[in-house]
Image: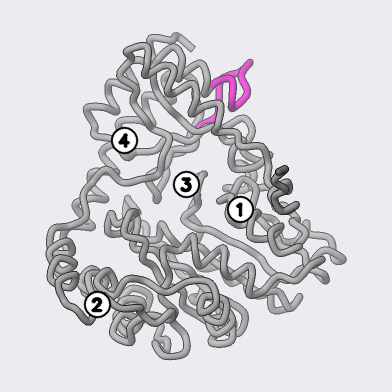
Amino acid sequence: MQIKTAARLGLLPPYLFAELDRLKKEVAASGVDVISLGIGDPDLPTPQHIVASLARAAALPQNHRYPDYEGLASYRQAAADWFRRRFGISFDPAREVCALIGSKEGIANFATAIVDPGDIVLIPDPGYPVYYSGCVFNGGEPYFLTLRKDAGFTPDFAAIPDEIARRAKLLWLNYPNNPTGATVDAAFFEHAARFCLKNNIVLAHDSAYSEIAYDGYRAPSVFDAPGARECAIEFHSLSKTFSMTGWRCGFAIGNPDLIAALGRVKTNVDSGVFQGIQEAAITALEGGDGDKLAEYCAIYKQRRDLLVPALREMGLGCALPRATFYVWAQVPNGYSSVSFTERVLKEAGVVITPGSGFGKGGEGFVRFSLTVSSERLREAVSRMKALRL
């Protein structure tokens, strides 16, 4: 029998990382102690009070049954309360908040709720790959907004042709930004909201990194912008904020019609977040150990301050990011993103991420993740310096 898969799978770009995964295994098999700076997965553990909360909740028989797709009322209330404390903006937990199995799931399902065949989706380039896959899997047409260094890795809305803006259905934004580490102020979201309201475009903001910040920076919400409640939804994740990547828990908040549309998709394709995890997430959002986030951000900052000067010394131009645990660096002259990544892996045993894996706009850059200990980071720097780039 010849298996024919769905044509939509052919719309995905070649899996750039497959060859890098092969090289990583090959290098490791040769006896090299490979150091991975390529994955955005916190090495710092989930705070113990959250783990203890899960242990208690997991033992309760009422949590062993199917959860509601929209989430426990108590979880949605905790999310709304956290949002109000953090951003000073109130939302109705019953109509304007929805639990997510991690924000990635919500982002993918939201495209299903919004995008019809032929609709244009405005996608940052470079950007999180799910924005693109959600678009094309639902028959949408991607229009890429190149994020340029000289513009602070923000899109130029004025450069979008009128015809494209007229046909566009959805705009994705992500600040603090993955992969560039770029940040914005509230005025940027005001500009974005005006653009979307003028052109009847849904504004979706991925805010997964809002709490990983340094040097006094406080990331704004898209809802700091006047009028945003008419057109916007924002996705939050507990993954980075509370070192809970494997737990798969987040929430969407915003316009009730957009939340309802997302909920209609979710009730048909998933079974919700395990209630024990939701109860532990309530513990996280209520802040039982308020100093832990500050402690973790201080550790990431220490690593940032170790890596950035070293990269600059090696000739890799990079900014000092005010948020996220990524450093976005330009590759040396004579290299592409992939060729540089391959050399660093083969000759130094250090895994980094080629910028082109996030879209054509990422060519010429690589992403370093700050999710290893300072000791391992120093070892990685030492090995890279020995390459004499």
Label 3 vs label 2: CA separation? 38 Å
Give the labeled residue for mark 1: 154
Tag of residue 281 = none
The colouring scheme, among rainbow, by chain, secondary structure or one colour, is: one colour
Question: Magenta stretch?
Answer: 329-340
- Callout 2 amino acid: Asn
How many labels were placed on the picture? Answer: 4
Give the labeled residue for mark 3: 181
- Callout 4 amino acid: Asp
Q: Residue at x 28, y 20 (%)?
A: 379
- Callout 1 amino acid: Thr
Give the labeled residue for mark 4: 305
Label 1 vs label 2: CA separation? 43 Å
Mark 1 and mark 2 in contact? Answer it, CB < 8 Å: no
Coordinates of residue 14 in the picture (x, y in percent): 66, 37
Label 4 vs label 3: CA separation? 14 Å
Q: Residue at x 32, y 71 (%)?
A: 274
Coordinates of residue 334 in the picture (x, y in percent): 63, 15
Mark 4 and mark 1 in contact? Answer it, CB < 8 Å: no
Which badge, 4 or 2, comes first in the chain's sequence? 2
Give the labeled residue for mark 2: 63
Looking at the rendered structure, the secondary structure element under dot 3 is loop
Which callout, 1 or 2, points to the residue nearer the camera?
A: 2
Foreground residue, 329 or 31?
31
Looking at the rendered structure, the secondary structure element under dot 4 is helix
Label 4 vs label 1: CA separation? 24 Å
> In the figure, 298 relative to 343: above or below?
below
Which badge, 4 or 3, comes first in the chain's sequence? 3
